[in-house]
Image (cartoon, helix red, strand yellow):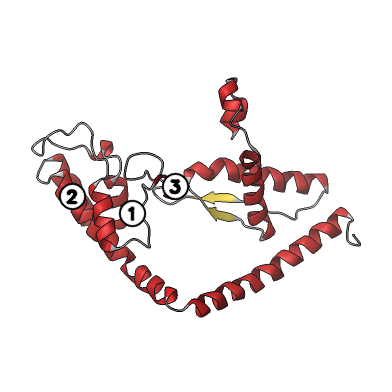
Amino acid sequence: MVKMLDSDESAAKEKVTYGLLGYPVLMASDILTFKGELVPVGKDQESHLEFARDVARRFNNFYNVDFFPEPKPEFTTTPLLKGVDGQKMGKSFNNDIKIADTEEDTIAKVKKAITDRTRIAKSDPGHTNLCEVPWPLYQIFASDKALLEKVKVDCESAAIGCVDCKVQLAGLINEYFRPMREKRKALAADPDQVRKIIEHGNLKARKVASQTLHDVREIMGMINW
């Protein structure tokens, strides 16, 4: 958002829509309503979180209160993952790996993942630092550090080809998601239970949100509005 608004190119400015501003405002309200202090986000959401901090800081300074905490990002060890095609990951691009995917779909997607573009033949040594998609995923799903090191050594010594390496990675991803997929399947078969869980969460969230809104109105002198 900041880059686009600072751009002098008319073509970029024509792309400015309400969503460009409205989305970070909505995100800020979601965070500040519950006084979030640490927010798990991807690297691409960091600027939106800065917007939320600006709102919190402005409110606190304007009304001389210490009401909203300034939320900080909580990044994982791999805060930005690419889609299997090497571009930004997104379900609208159909380049993501979904929890809802079958194990067969996961294998098929991972097999398409962009690897080291400089490695032409299987006999060529690979470069994990140039492996665009599989290597970052290995760092997430390979809980065994010894396995991670073996993958790195095998890749860089050409002891394993990219196809076999990706099949192994798909197995790790499927193993990781298997319990979640089983739980998802069970919930999908019981929609009444899903609705109960959602309603329970709604009630808890509504209680906190109502109190925050009441406190904000009181601070602003709008308690009787």
The answer to whether residue 63 is above or below residue 86 is below
Residue 223 locus on image (x, y percent): 88, 61
For mark 2, does the 10 Å Cα neighbourhood hold few (<14), some (14 to 19), or many (20 or more) residues?
A: some
The answer to whether residue 84 is above or below residue 197 is above
Secondary structure under tag 2 reads helix
Residue type at the position of mark 2? Cys
Residue 147 locus on image (x, y percent): 20, 56
Residue 92 circle label: 3
Which of 19 and 4 lies nearest the eye of the viewer?
19
Q: CA distance from mark 2 to mark 1?
A: 15 Å
For mark 3, does the 10 Å Cα neighbourhood hold few (<14), some (14 to 19), or many (20 or more) residues?
A: few
Figure disc tally: 3
Residue type at the position of mark 3? Ser
Residue positioned 30% across, 44% down in the render = 133
Secondary structure under tag 3 reads helix
Residue type at the position of mark 1? Ile
